[in-house]
Amino acid sequence: MFLGTTIETTVVRVVDGDTIRVQLPHLEQEKSLRLLNLETEESNSGSNKIITPWGQQAKERAEQFFQPNDRVTLEYPGTESPEICHRRYQDNYGRPLLLIHKQGVDYQEVMIREGYSPYFNKYGNAVFSEYHQRYQQAERDAQEANLGVWDQLAANGENIHNYAALGIWWSLRAEIVDGFRHYKAHQSDLLNSRLDFEEIVARAQYQEKVVVFTELRSLRRITATSARIEIGSVKQPFSLYLPNTESPGGKAVVNLLNNRYFSTENAPKRSYAYVAGQLRMFNKNPQITIKSTAQIMDEPALSAIPLLKQADKLASA
């Protein structure tokens, strides 16, 4: 039984272990899917990731599982209409985010259980708790049997991936995303910079004050004293603007971002925050101006209004 919105379609070809190209009937075009909860190792050139033997093995397993013209079921991590799901659930580059099943078999679970991928929750645990529990158990089964990615020497020789360390960071991020889902269920006015991008754009037209849950990826200098905080998404280009990084308030914001939020695999941090402020459109993209660290939080306030007033007061002090 499927829990999310589903569509039936046909496979065009396998790109790699976690990316399948299909024909999307409601769009009448081919699209590459970024499969949720999988992160197989690289098998194709053109990426900044290292190609590994086990990445090639994962691609070959996918090609064994999926043949061209196979009928498959695609499942979105939501229950909206297919058209809304397609606009809402996309990765940073516009690829649909989906689960894929063939003849009732959950491909994601197969790949995790056979050790071709860890249970990838860097961007959140599986939305449906039943799937989350299955994928967790599949990963434990693979770890108990020391399969695939869990036996890096056998899988890759010298090209070692430290999945134990990565898993800790991914789990921290997943817990934070789970927290957002909990808060969102009780505070419907909270927005997600990726899932609610269309609504954020609409609200920016009216310069509304909002609280946005977002990833904080990097700082890009605009001038010697101004910068933009980006979330790392080409498809959902929401950003935060720092008008003066050299003021006391601006320096405090930069320090907070570097020490608490900006992450790399070698220096993992929280990555996600709740940002309060007034939306505006700049160069056709939505943006919030940040003048105070009070605008950047680990948890949302019960009401955005007092928080925004506090931030405005601090920023004008």
Image: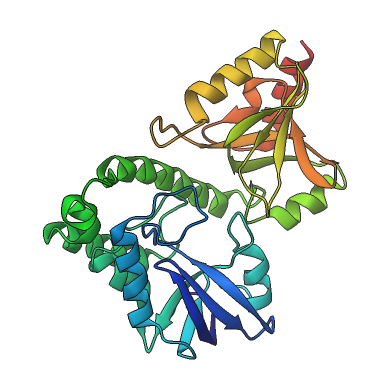
Quick check: 4 left or right of 224? left
Quick check: 310 left or right of 78? right
- Above or below residue 191? Residue 271 is above
Q: What residue is rendered at 53% in x and 72% in y? A: 76
Q: Name the quarter where the N terminus is drawn.
A: bottom left
Q: Closer to the camera, 159 or 21?
A: 159
Q: What residue is rendered at 34% in x and 65% in y? A: 56
Q: Where is residue 157 in the image (x, y as percent from the top left)?
A: 21, 50
Quick check: 93 left or right of 174? right
Q: What residue is rendered at 62% in x and 73% in y? A: 80
Question: Is residue 301 visible from the viewing direction of this image?
Answer: no
* Labels in figure, total: 0
Image quarter for residue 197? bottom right
- Above or below residue 226? Residue 280 is below
Q: Where is residue 143 in the image (x, y as percent from the top left)?
A: 17, 57
Image quarter for residue 18? bottom left
Q: Where is residue 16 in the image (x, y as percent from the top left)?
A: 43, 68
Quick check: 193 left or right of 184? right
Question: Is residue 175 visible from the viewing direction of this image?
Answer: yes
Q: Name the quarter where the C terminus is drawn.
A: top right
Q: Closer to the camera, 82 or 304?
A: 82
Q: What residue is rendered at 62% in x and 41% in y? A: 231
Q: Closer to the camera, 125 or 236?
A: 236
Q: Where is residue 92 in the image (x, y as percent from the top left)?
A: 60, 54
Q: How is the rendered protein coloured? A: rainbow
- Above or below residue 271? Residue 20 is below
